[in-house]
């Protein structure tokens, strides 16, 4: 019997190795690029439509055109869900865990790589929507400039909200593991419950993802009054960013804990 | 070298693997035999750390799987044929896994050549036949050129030429000094491949022996296997129900 010489190199696999794997996985699926392209294009089209139909001179014009990001958030959130649930659907998760058995490291690599991609795509989409919507204003309205107070912040945080909703999706995917169920929870949590509770209980509305994005992150004026006695006190932009980050972090932490505990 | 010690796994009230202990030694093919549902796949999953055991442990080269430094370079595994995303190409699938263990990209083309998928490497793997999917799974197992190989039913879906090919491949890998652990429910297939046998039934060890020893006292290896596993299969005899009714009090 010949004895096999050990050719295993020194050291061990690290975050950067697992992150490279996750990056190759993401970029080699055509659906990734389609989703990002549709997200950016959809945001721009919405922003143009809003721009063309904005009449009020008193409106927060930046906030108006950035409303175009809201539908695209759903696509990024779904993409985040699929980053992990598609591995359970296909059985790939077993090959992935055989290659990288340290599970918290794996989820961290997925979050790091997907989060970076979602942030890049989100910023591109937010700036695209901002300029496309601004160019579409009529009725004697002039487009807001990035140099005006709060405008650059609103656009940047609008882009960041894609990343945070994407990571929330990834965390929910890790917890739930089934694509359809995870997407349902994401949509319910971000959109539907937001709208229902928002209408019923104004006190908690400020803490719901959809209102944080619409009224804290993407606005130049976080407090809005719809009329006398109808003032809603929304979180400041930075407080909103913190709360939304906390949601994503909690979902990822629970997802990571379950990933370690459960059989694959 | 794989060392399995008192490995136990329970799913609800079912004892899938029951205090299983055996070694898989380097330099030979060890066949892992048992009827359907006897716990072969569960044992493989426990060795790979995919499922957590309720008791006992498995070590590869002295370490638990999750403590391996470069898992794909230390153990290669084929568990299920279609463990890949259908939208990704075979090349992309292997390239991603190679990156996770710092394996050179050139190795991807090497293993694709080795399993005969070089021509289909850039196509969506979702279009692969079961045989091609199985070859891709074998390419994954060989990616890190590991000293230990675990293959769950590797001949599934392969045509006769493919079965012949994998038999020669596994024998030559063992000849190079690797520990090769191959499960099958086909005794005839294992007889042509393995030197050593680990036989289980209902999660318990029934035999840990050489092929020669097992077949020594029986007319054939198949007879020996059936006698060994007879108590752990649930097949009824076709006329059994009828006969019993006749024998009952009238």
Image (spheres, coloured by chain):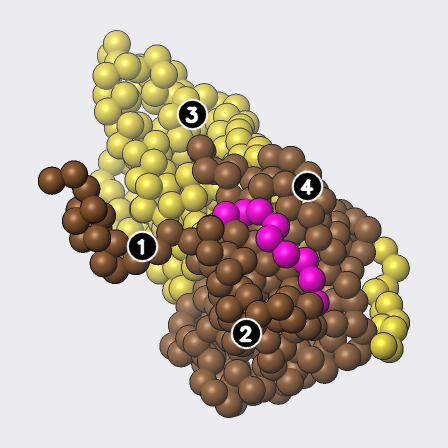
Chain colours: A yellow, B brown
Q: If you read the primary sequence from the N terminus, does the residue marked by circle 2 or circle 1 appear first?
A: 2
Q: Which residue is mark 4?
A: B6
Q: Which residue is mark 3?
A: A222
Few, some or many residues within 10 Å of mark 3 (<14, 14–19, 20+): many
User: On residue A224, which mark appears?
Assistant: none
Identify which residue, B32 or A215, lies in the foreground. Answer: B32
Q: Is residue B188 in view from this perspective?
A: yes
Provide the residue span drawn in magenta. B202-211
Residue pictured at 85% horizontal, 64% vertical: A9
SS at mark 2? loop
Few, some or many residues within 10 Å of mark 1 (<14, 14–19, 20+): few
Residue A83: image location, x then y, percent: 48, 52
Q: Which residue is mark 1?
A: B236
Which one is in front in this view, the residue at disc 2 or the one at disc 1? 2
Residue A70: image location, x then y, percent: 34, 43
Q: If you read the primary sequence from the N terminus, does the residue marked by circle 4 or circle 1 appear first?
A: 4
Residue B176: image location, x then y, percent: 79, 78
Which one is in front in this view, the residue at disc 3 or the one at disc 4? 4
CA distance separating discs 4 and 2 = 32 Å
The residue sitting at the left extreme is B250
Residue pictured at 23% horizontal, 16% vertical: A200
């Amino acid at each position: 019997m010949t004895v096999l010489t050990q050719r295993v190199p020194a050291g061990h696999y690290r975050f950067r190795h697992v992150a490279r794997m996750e990056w190759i996985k993401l970029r080699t699926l055509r659906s990734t690029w389609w989703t990002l392209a549709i997200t950016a294009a959809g945001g721009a089209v919405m922003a143009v439509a809003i721009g063309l139909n904005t009449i009020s001179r008193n409106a927060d014009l930046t906030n108006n055109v950035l409303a175009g990001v809201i539908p695209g958030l759903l696509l990024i959130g779904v993409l985040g869900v699929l980053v992990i649930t598609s591995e359970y659907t296909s059985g790939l998760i077993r090959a992935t865990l055989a290659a990288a058995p340290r599970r918290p490291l794996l989820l961290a690599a997925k979050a790091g790589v997907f989060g970076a991609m979602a942030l890049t795509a989100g910023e591109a989409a937010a700036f695209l929507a901002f300029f496309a919507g601004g160019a579409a204003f009529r009725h004697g309205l002039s487009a807001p400039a990035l140099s005006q107070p709060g405008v650059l912040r609103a656009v940047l945080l609008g882009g960041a909200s894609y990343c945070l909703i994407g990571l929330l999706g990834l965390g929910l995917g890790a917890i739930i593991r089934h694509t359809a169920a995870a997407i349902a929870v994401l949509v319910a949590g971000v959109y539907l419950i937001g709208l229902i509770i928002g209408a019923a209980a104004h006190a908690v509305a400020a803490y719901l993802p959809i209102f944080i994005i619409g009224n804290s992150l993407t606005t130049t004026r976080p407090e809005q009054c719809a009329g006398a006695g109808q003032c809603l006190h929304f979180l400041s932009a930075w407080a909103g960013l913190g709360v939304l980050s906390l949601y994503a972090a909690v979902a990822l932490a629970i997802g990571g804990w379950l990933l370690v505990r459960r059989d694959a | 070298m794989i060392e399995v010690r008192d490995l136990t796994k329970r799913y609800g009230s079912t004892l899938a693997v029951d205090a299983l202990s055996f070694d898989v030694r380097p330099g030979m093919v060890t066949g892992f035999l048992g009827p359907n549902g006897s716990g072969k796949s569960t044992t493989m999953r426990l060795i790979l750390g995919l499922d957590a055991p309720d008791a006992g442990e498995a070590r590869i080269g002295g370490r638990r799987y999750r403590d391996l430094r470069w898992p794909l370079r230390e153990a290669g595994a084929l568990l299920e044929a279609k463990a890949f995303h259908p939208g990704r190409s075979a090349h992309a699938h292997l390239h991603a896994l190679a990156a996770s263990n710092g394996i050179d990209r050139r190795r991807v083309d090497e293993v694709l050549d080795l399993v005969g998928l070089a021509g289909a490497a850039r196509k969506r793997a979702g279009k692969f036949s079961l045989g091609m999917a199985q070859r891709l799974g074998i390419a994954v197992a060989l990616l890190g050129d590991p000293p230990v190989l675990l293959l769950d039913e590797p001949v599934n879906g392969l045509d006769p030429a493919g079965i012949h090919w994998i038999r020669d491949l596994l024998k030559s890998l063992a000849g190079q000094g690797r520990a090769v652990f191959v499960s099958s429910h086909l005794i005839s297939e294992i007889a042509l491949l393995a030197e050593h046998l680990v036989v289980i039934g209902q999660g318990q060890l029934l035999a840990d022996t050489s092929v020669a020893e097992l077949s020594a006292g029986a007319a054939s290896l198949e007879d020996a296997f059936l006698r060994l596993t007879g108590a752990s299969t649930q097949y009824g005899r076709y006329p059994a129900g009828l006969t019993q009714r006749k024998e009952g009090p009238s």
